[in-house]
Image: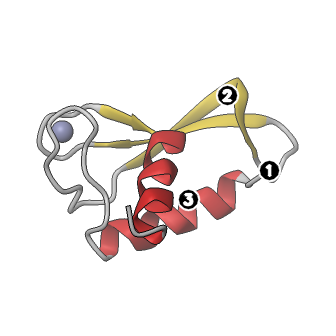
Amino acid sequence: MITLGEAYTILKHAVRDRKLRCVACHRVLDEFKAEWYPHPDGLPGPDGKRYWLYLVCPHCQYQNAWWKLLKQLERESHGH
Ligand SMILES: [Zn+2]
């Protein structure tokens, strides 16, 4: 299982490299706006609790869940 810190770093680099698109408006996420909150199905954080991580789209404000964005990266690395 990927940790909160690992997911945060992967998504930050992906936004820097302009590799992610908003799930709702399909525009490139060109600004890193990460937020998280406690959630039982989330990612394990440094304190042992689980957190839901999402990136806020700078264009439409949609909250893109971490797992949807990681899926996008996975698809890309497998050459579609
Ligand atoms: Zn959007």
Rendered position, 78 above or below 32: below
Q: Are marks 3 and 1 in contact (CB under 8 Å)?
A: no
Is the distance from the Cβ of mark 3 to the nearest ligand 1 atom less than 8 Å? no
Q: Is residue 65 left or right of residue 40?
A: left
Rendered position, 56 above or below 77: above
Instruction: Indicate which quadrant contains ligand 1.
Output: top left
Comes first in the chain, label 1 or label 2: 1
Marks 1/2: CA–CA distance: 17 Å
Which label number is shown at residue 8? 3
Rendered position, 12 above or below 43: below
Circle 1: element type = loop
Tell me what residue is drawn at x 24 percent, y 60 percent. Answer: 31
Tell me what residue is drawn at x 28 percent, y 37 percent. Answer: 23
Tell me what residue is drawn at x 43 percent, y 49 percent. Answer: 69
Number of other residues with Cα within 10 Å of mark 1, as a class: few under 14, some 14 to 19, many 20 or more: few
Number of other residues with Cα within 10 Å of mark 3, as a class: few under 14, some 14 to 19, many 20 or more: some
- Between residues 56 and 47, which one lies in front from this camera angle? 56
Marks 3/2: CA–CA distance: 15 Å
Which residue is labeled 1 in the image? 1
Which label number is shown at residue 61? none
Marks 3/1: CA–CA distance: 14 Å
Which residue is labeled 2 in the image? 38
- Between residues 71 and 31, which one lies in front from this camera angle? 71
Residue farthest top in this picture: 40
The picture places residue 2, in percent across and down from the top left corner, at 73, 54
Residue farthest right in this picture: 48
Q: Nearer the viewer, mark 3 or mark 1?
A: 1
Task: Report the quarter where the C terminus lies.
Answer: bottom left
The picture places residue 27, in percent across and down from the top left corner, at 13, 49
Number of other residues with Cα within 10 Å of mark 2, as a class: few under 14, some 14 to 19, many 20 or more: some
Q: Nearer the viewer, mark 1 or mark 2?
A: 1
